[in-house]
Amino acid sequence: MTTVQLTSKDFKSNLKPIWCPGCGDFGVVQGIYRALASIGRPPHEIAFVSGIGCSSRIPGYTTAYGFNTVHGRALPIAQGIKLANPELLVLVAGGDGDGFSIGGGHVPHAIRRNPDLTYLVMDNQIYGLTKGQLSPTSACGLKTVTSPHGAIEHPVNPLLYVLSYGAGFVAQATPADMAGMTAIIEEAIRYPGFSFVNVQSPCVTYGEDHQQVKAHRTAMKTLASMGHDPSDRMRAFELASHYGEQLYTGVFYRNPNPPPTYGALVKERQAALAGGLPRERILESFIQR
Amino acid sequence: MTTQTESMHPPATDLVIGMAGSGGDGIVSAGESLIAAAAAEGYHAMMTKSFGSQIRGGESSCRVRIGTSALHNPGGILDVAVALNWEDFLRFGAELPVSSQTVVIYEKATNVAPDQLPLGGVHPTDVFAVPIEEIARKAAGTDLAKNTVVLGLLAGWFDLAPDAILRGIRKRFAKKSAELVQNNEKAFQSGIDYAKANPLRQARPLARVSRSTAGLMLLDGNDMCAAASLFAGCEFFGGYPITPSTEIMQYLSREIWRYGGAVLQAEDEIAGIGAAVGASFAGKKSMTATSGPGMSLKTEMLGLASIAELPLVVVNVMRGGPSTGLPTKPEQSDLFQAAFSGHGDVLRPILAPTSVADTFRVTVEAFNLAEHYQTPVMILSDQEIAQRKETVDAIDTSRFEVLHRRVPTGAELESYERFRATESGISPISHPGMQGGNYLAAGIEHNDKGDPTVSGKIHARMNEKRFRKLDPLRHRQDLFAIEGDADAPLALIAWGSVAGVCRESLARVRASGLRAKLLVPTLLWPIAEGVYQDFLASVQAGLVVELSHQGQLYRMLRMQVDVPRGLKSLTRSGANPFLPSEIAQRLEQLAIDLQSRVSDQKGEG
């Protein structure tokens, strides 16, 4: 593992983002560049994995090893990468549909394994890439092209979802507060274990006015300003339950005593069991005696 | 049996025993004891198990074949049938076929008269209604020892390695208690005594075999696949339990850590293959294993690995389908799925082992192809091979080459392009951690560098590259076994577990004077047109024998090869095994048909 003196530029690739002008994801990728520069791991030691969706384009806009996979499956793939090479810094990103609809079943299992990776969801409450359908975090009543008469389902609450499955680090951010978001992403990456950041990243094309960056600036309320103690998990639940009503930013929960990571336990097991028959003699265990 | 009868009949060189009972009867465990004892004596032996899909109770059966020379299949009609109750025995139908030559041993308490056996009109000459349960209770104080009594009966009647069986019994029960050892010894001896007191009409002792048992292994196909994967350098397995493939994950869950690797038991089939794709992206040899329904779920990920050109070994241990189908029985009906599932233009190599021993070679080959060609490779095993235990002669692993993916050199990393156009179509592959190798892997089409593109021109070029790199496979003659008479007009083509049945059928017809040959492809897809054309050049009539309703290889051959009119498909749905004798008879009939065709043509002329 190496840390070197790096700037945001070192993480910016030559690919020009194809997001709509004004998309919240522009801010998010800037925040990621800055957080990574501050952490100081060189790009080749970073694996950045995503699913499918507008936001899942993000690994390509960085100089890290990127893997833009299939819809909803970024987390399993990222866990395979992390297990294969625990030294890598592994970032996972995707949208709310990727993480809480098609890939929703993978989130609890990533949490219960506790791999040391960071999962950033760019939550815009809409399917943008397919042009404006209802998403799992869309508000009840929302009219979209697939809910022309108004949605009759209730949204998933991503914060409660990950909190209740036991994630050790749960935060929310908005690109409306670049400094705050960058600090949260950096803290999430530094957290030793599964960390989750729900970034309220507005869809400029299909989102509503109150969901845009400008509206966030006035609506957001930092948890720090409210004196929230991030080690208080029950209070975190209470605050997180206001998802969709009140834009809280900051760290809802940070486990003060992080348990051993998946990678650490795997390493421990490998060390404990090392020294079997050499690979070329593996069949000897089947010999009849 | 008496010395007199022994001198009248030469000892048998091959014995096929089928046993069935209820789940708790310990029939399979008796089979395990039998095969272990046979192996210890130096016999070639093979055991298949078949169950209802209940976990406890229900019916269970096993078929044990013991021979003095190499065995290719679990045998045809039973030489010996053991029924602890008839209801369970008959549930296995064609899996346990009985003829009038079969020695039938059954539980007397079933109250079925020896001349009233429910065997569809078959009247075996040697039938023994044995009070198995009663003997067990008397000898061991419990009917749990029924299976030990059965072992005694078999040892007594067929002179089947009694000393080795006894050693096995002692070893097995020694862990429990001295009393259990003693009780089971008694039960075993009671079985032998019963057999001696009630001799067969014709003694059928199994000939002794004298060969060194040094290095002789006894294992099933799933364990062989898992062990071979470790030999080939597998460092990651992601999977989800599914019958009949789960033992692969179970073995690796025990062993892979010793080699610095890891197993991830995933939340679902998709995550299992996903984690394996991730580990491969990170530079490790990786594998996943499943059966048909799981394969359906994994399919999207196969497309990702294909377009991202990531090495991956995917095992499908086939069972009867579609859907849950026959989850505990073999079938060869997933070949279309293996070749054609998934969207887009894609070519994935498919390999099939024909036996437990062959599973080693095929698994190592699968890793070599995956790593060399940077592609997912499918292994199509089936329930029979995967769960059948057989004796395997020592394998000299130094004869097997292990290939690794071609990583970029330092010079290549100076101006690295992940998907650089090369003559072979194979581009050096970097992985995270490698400085200068950074690239974006993606499901979206990409240019040489790896950057996303929607250019039709680049897409066409990349498709061409991904197909071209696999061209050399079509010329891998070593992935095909051809046996028999090179210029024969009669032919068999068979793959997977059915190949072993056809090997025996071929030997039979050739011994009776037919000129015939057999082609066994290890490489099922892509179709090596040239190999088939050469093989079929002399063929006027033949059979592609497959355990499926459709005959999927036959249909794929018809798609791609100019097959002679006389080459037909012989198929049967799963759980209805082919018998070596019936395929031999079919070949003999084909020969007679050919004669009449010749005479018809002469007559017309």
Image (cartoon, coloured by chain):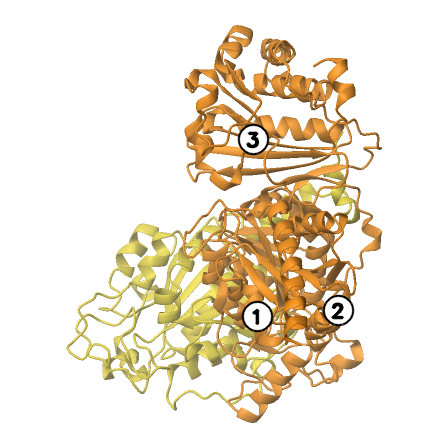
Q: Amino acid at mark 2?
A: Arg
Q: Colour of chain B?
A: orange
Residue B553 at least partly seen: yes
Label 3 in the same subunit as label 1: yes
Residue B147, horizontal then vertical, whole percent: 55, 21
Res. B100 mark: 3
Q: Amino acid at mark 3?
A: Ser
Q: Disc 3 and disc 1: Cα gap in Å?
A: 40 Å
Residue that mark 2 sits on? B476
Residue B418 at least partly seen: no
Of the 4 image quadrants, the one containing the N terminus of chain B is top right
Q: Secondary structure at mark 2?
A: loop
Q: Secondary structure at mark 1?
A: helix
Q: Which chain is yellow?
A: A
- Answer left or right for B402 relative to A140: right
Residue A57, horizontal then vertical, whole percent: 47, 80
- The disc, 2 or 3, on the residue closer to the chain's N-terminal end is 3
Front-lying residue, B276 or B8: B8
From the image, state whether disc 3 or disc 1 is nearer to you.
3
- Answer left or right for A35 relative to B15: left
* Mark 3: few/some/many CA within 10 Å (<14, 14-19, 20+): some
Label 2 in the same subunit as label 3: yes
